[in-house]
Image: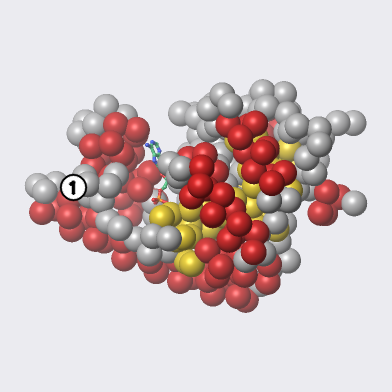
């Protein structure tokens, strides 16, 4: 039986719209047979997702999407097939939770000065025990009618140069990779085309990522534009990286890739799951 992989998704443990069990149910309906739940800086959804995946008969790959800083730029590194009980990983993620909490308070203060009081409190309630992200701010600002939607709220309030923007120093790239490796996982550079890096910067990033122990790169991504698969495949070949496939599904605002809708991996690439299926 063919396997259909989606190795990058979110639940309410971070900024996804669906609780882990519901996400798994939707993955089953979409025809996915091997699903990684990769919440931002959190593994809190994995237990619930595993129970749901076991009862539905699909495979769950424990994962996390770590926020990292490289050359003052934010990058995202997906750790696949991790042991969430690993101490270095848990300590690293605990530090990122602190950073996220502090940042969210600061975003709230800035929006307050801008004339929008009470946003932090509302957003903290919205996120509940989940990891606080800018997506929660964007949803709340859109709900208040202050933006036309989540994307518009990012553009108006939350991106560089906007009233609620806070520059954040996340984990160093090398640290994030080390935590993932300590947890027995494979570090995959997420959505490489979304960082707005020039070709030479992107190659520099990949060289250093590989040097630091990075294992793979997302080649087929739900958020990729036409041409991105080929460009990312070329990077995988050049830097001898394994290839991953992930939709970056967050909820109904994103499309869920129906079977076969994520572009297939070029046949010469080695898929990242060869690490744990051989
Ligand atoms: P954070 O890690 O808290 O800075 O939030 C980053 C998350 O915000 C990403 O993982 C996306 O889910 C979401 N995001 C970033 N930019 C946009 C955008 N322009 N429109 C919608 N969602 C976005
Ligand atoms: Mn997100
Ligand atoms: Mn990301
Ligand atoms: Mn993501």
Relative placement, left or right, of 215 versus 69 is right
Q: Which quadrant holds residue 100?
A: bottom left
Between 207 and 7, the residue placed more toward the observer is: 207
Residue 172 visible, this angle? yes
Q: Position of residue 34 (x, y in %)?
A: 75, 41
Q: Position of residue 277 (x, y in %)?
A: 86, 50
Ligand 1 lies in quarter = top left
Q: Position of residue 96 (x, y in %)?
A: 45, 66
Q: Position of residue 154 (x, y in %)?
A: 31, 39
Residue for point 24% across, 60% down = 106
Query: Is 46 located above or below residue 175 in the figure?
Result: above
Q: Which quadrant holds residue 146?
A: top left
Between 239 and 86, the residue placed more toward the observer is: 239
Q: Identify the coloring.
A: secondary structure
Residue 82 visible, this angle? no
Q: Which quadrant holds residue 29?
A: top right
As drawn, the residue found furthest toward the front would be 200
Which residue lies under the disc numbered 1? 163
Residue for point 14% across, 46% down = 116
Relative placement, left or right, of 148 versus 182 is left
Query: Is 95 located above or below residue 275 in the figure?
Result: below
| Circle 1 residues within 10 Å: few <14, some 14–19, many ≥20 | some
Residue for point 90% across, 51% down = 278
Query: Is 61 located above or below residue 229 in the figure?
Result: below
Which quarter of the figure is the N terminus placed in?
Answer: top right
Residue for point 45% across, 71% down = 95
Q: Is mark 1 within 8 Å of ligand 1?
A: no
């Amino acid at each position: 039986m063919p396997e259909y992989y989606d190795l990058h998704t979110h639940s309410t443990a971070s900024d996804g719209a669906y609780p882990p069990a519901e996400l798994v149910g939707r993955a089953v309906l979409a025809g996915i047979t091997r699903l990684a739940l990769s919440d931002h800086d959190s593994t809190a959804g994995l237990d619930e997702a595993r129970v749901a995946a076991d009862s539905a008969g699909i495979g769950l790959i424990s994962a996390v999407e770590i926020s990292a800083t490289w050359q003052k730029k934010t990058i995202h590194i997906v750790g696949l097939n991790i042991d969430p009980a690993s101490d270095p990983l848990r300590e690293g993620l605990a530090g990122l939770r602190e950073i996220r909490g502090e940042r969210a308070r600061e975003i709230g203060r800035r929006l307050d000065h801008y004339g929008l009081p009470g946003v932090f409190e509302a957003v903290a309630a919205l996120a509940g025990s989940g990891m606080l992200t800018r997506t929660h701010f964007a949803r709340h600002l859109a709900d208040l009618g202050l933006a036309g939607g989540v994307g518009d709220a990012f553009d108006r309030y939350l991106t560089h140069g906007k009233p609620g923007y806070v520059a954040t120093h996340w984990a160093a790239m090398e640290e994030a990779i080390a935590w993932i490796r300590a947890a027995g996982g494979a570090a995959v550079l997420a959505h490489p085309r979304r960082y707005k890096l020039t070709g030479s910067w992107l190659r520099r990033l990949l060289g250093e990522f590989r040097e630091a122990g990075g294992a793979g790169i997302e080649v087929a991504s739900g958020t990729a534009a036409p041409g991105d698969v080929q460009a990312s495949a070329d990077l995988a070949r050049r830097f001898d990286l394994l290839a991953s496939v992930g939709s970056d599904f967050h909820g109904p605002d994103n499309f869920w890739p129906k079977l076969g809708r994520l572009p297939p991996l070029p046949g010469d690439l080695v898929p990242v799951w060869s690490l744990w299926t051989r």
